[in-house]
Image: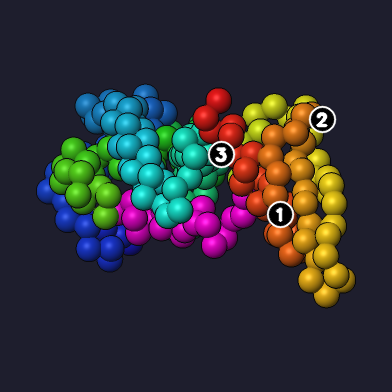
């Protein structure tokens, strides 16, 4: 099976086979073969741009809407070296990579940096050969589950708040129960969320867990406007 069998299986059209093959050609292979074949570095540049706008559009479409700051964090996660390498491994795309002997021996076929660059080049080649619609079709198939994990049903506001402040690992998030009102069978919790000792949000609910989520939502909405 080769990359064209993969594309046929996913019903992705192509015309320029040489361009697609170039996307899977590492510079180490070109250095060892002087037949005039090109490496995938320029295609990687194009693919990176396609991935950025694709992920931005898909994140923008999530309902309820994500705060701008959180969209930036999620986009960074979606198109990170680690995330793209995972997609490559899930679909065995690195099986089609052409490497030089030395790069092969040192584990290049499974190295995150190498195979994530290859994936970007692959998307760049499809985009140049078939246009945005086809490139997006392929990305939707390969990244659908990863994007779905961002949906509100999968991640709550506490998770989103944690990711929002994760850029500075020194910051701590603490949820403090300020009061519990009402009878035991119908309590109402008031919770504050503090980041490094400063209160950023409040939440009320009939359960402590939901009150914490509401407080995190309140904090996120305020932080997104800063």
Helix, strand or loop: magenta stretch: helix
Q: Secondary structure at mark 1?
A: strand
Residue at x-position 66% and y-position 45% = 216
Mark found first going from the N terminus, 2 or 3: 2
Q: How far apart, in angstroms, are the residues tagged by discs 2 and 3?
A: 18 Å
Mark found first going from the N terminus, 1 or 3: 1
Residue 206 is situated, as x and y percent measured from the top left of the image, at 74, 64
In the image: residue 46, left or right of residue 79? left
Q: Quadrant of residue 197?
A: top right
Decide which of 180, 196 is in the foreground and name it: 180
Residue at x-position 62% and y-position 43% = 218
Residue 45 is situated, as x and y percent measured from the top left of the image, at 33, 28
Residue 140 is situated, as x and y percent measured from the top left of the image, at 34, 55
In the rendered image of this protein, does residue 114 appear above or below residue 93?
A: above
Mark 2 highlights which residue?
197
Q: For residue 16, which numbered disc appears in the image?
A: none
Q: What stretch of residues is rendered in magenta?
A: 138-159
Does residue 114 appear in this view?
no
In the image: residue 136, left or right of residue 176? left
Q: Residues within 10 Å of mark 1 (few under 14, many from 20)?
A: many
Taking the magenta stretch, the answer to whether it contains residue 158 is: yes
Mark 1 highlights which residue?
204
Mark 3 highlights which residue?
221
């Amino acid at each position: 099976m080769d990359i064209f069998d993969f594309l046929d299986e996913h019903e992705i059209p192509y015309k320029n086979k040489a361009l697609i093959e170039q996307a899977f050609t590492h510079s180490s292979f070109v250095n060892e073969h002087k037949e005039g074949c090109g490496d995938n570095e320029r295609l990687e540049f194009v693919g990176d741009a396609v991935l950025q706008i694709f992920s931005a559009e898909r994140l923008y479409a999530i309902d309820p809407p994500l705060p701008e700051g959180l969209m930036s964090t999620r986009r960074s996660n979606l198109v990170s070296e680690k995330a793209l390498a995972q997609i490559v491994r899930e679909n065995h795309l690195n099986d089609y990579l052409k490497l030089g002997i030395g790069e092969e021996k040192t584990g290049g076929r499974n190295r995150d940096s190498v195979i994530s660059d290859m994936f970007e080049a692959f998307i760049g080649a499809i985009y140049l050969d078939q246009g945005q619609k086809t490139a997006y079709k392929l990305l939707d198939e390969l990244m659908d589950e990863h994007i779905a994990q961002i949906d509100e049903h999968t991640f709550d506001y506490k998770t989103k708040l944690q990711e929002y402040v994760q850029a500075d690992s020194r910051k701590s998030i603490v949820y403090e129960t300020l009061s519990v009102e009402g009878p035991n069978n119908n309590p109402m919790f008031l919770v504050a969320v503090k980041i490094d000792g400063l209160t950023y949000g409040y939440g009320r609910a009939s359960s402590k867990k939901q009150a914490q989520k509401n407080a995190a939502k309140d904090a996120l909405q305020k932080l997104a406007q800063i």
